[in-house]
Amino acid sequence: MAAARVRTLLYASAFVRAMATSTAGVTVGGYLARLEVGGGTLGIVVSAGLAGAAVAAIGATLIADRMG
């Protein structure tokens, strides 16, 4: 596969992942707000979700790097 094609696919997948993460954060935040959860708890839940996504991305990067 040509390098330009690989780069385009990489950027597209990063964009889709970022959109999914942000949409999930907003959706969970809205849901918890409707349940009248406090702002501190809401921040902890959304932060934990974003941290989990970051850890998963790092793990996937390390595994992909080992595979070549």
Image: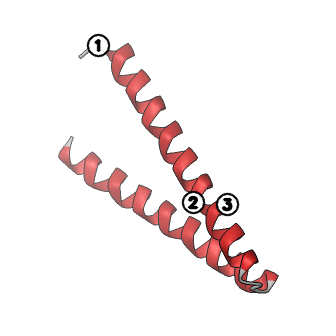
In the image, 24 versus 2, the foreground residue is 24
Question: What residue is at 71 percent from the left and 68 percent from the top?
Answer: 30
In the image, 50 versus 23, the foreground residue is 23
Q: Does dot 1 land on a helix, a strand or a loop?
A: loop
The kind of residue tagged 1 is Ala
Specify which label sits upstream in the sequence, 1 or 3. 1
Residue pointed to by mark 3 = 26
- Which mark identifies residue 37? none
Residues at circles 2 and 3 in contact by the CB criterion of under 8 Å: yes
Q: Disc 2 vs disc 1: which is toward the camera?
A: 2
What crowding class fits label 3: few (fewer than 14 Cα within 10 Å), some (14-19), or many (20 or more)? few
The kind of residue tagged 3 is Val
The kind of residue tagged 2 is Ala
Q: Position of residue 61 (x, y in %)?
A: 36, 51
**In the depicted structure, whether residue 11 falls above or below residue 42:** above
Is 1 on the left or on the right of 54, as rendered?
Answer: left
What crowding class fits label 2: few (fewer than 14 Cα within 10 Å), some (14-19), or many (20 or more)? some
Q: Position of residue 17 (x, y in %)?
A: 48, 46
Quadrant the N terminus occupies: top left
Residue pointed to by mark 2 = 24
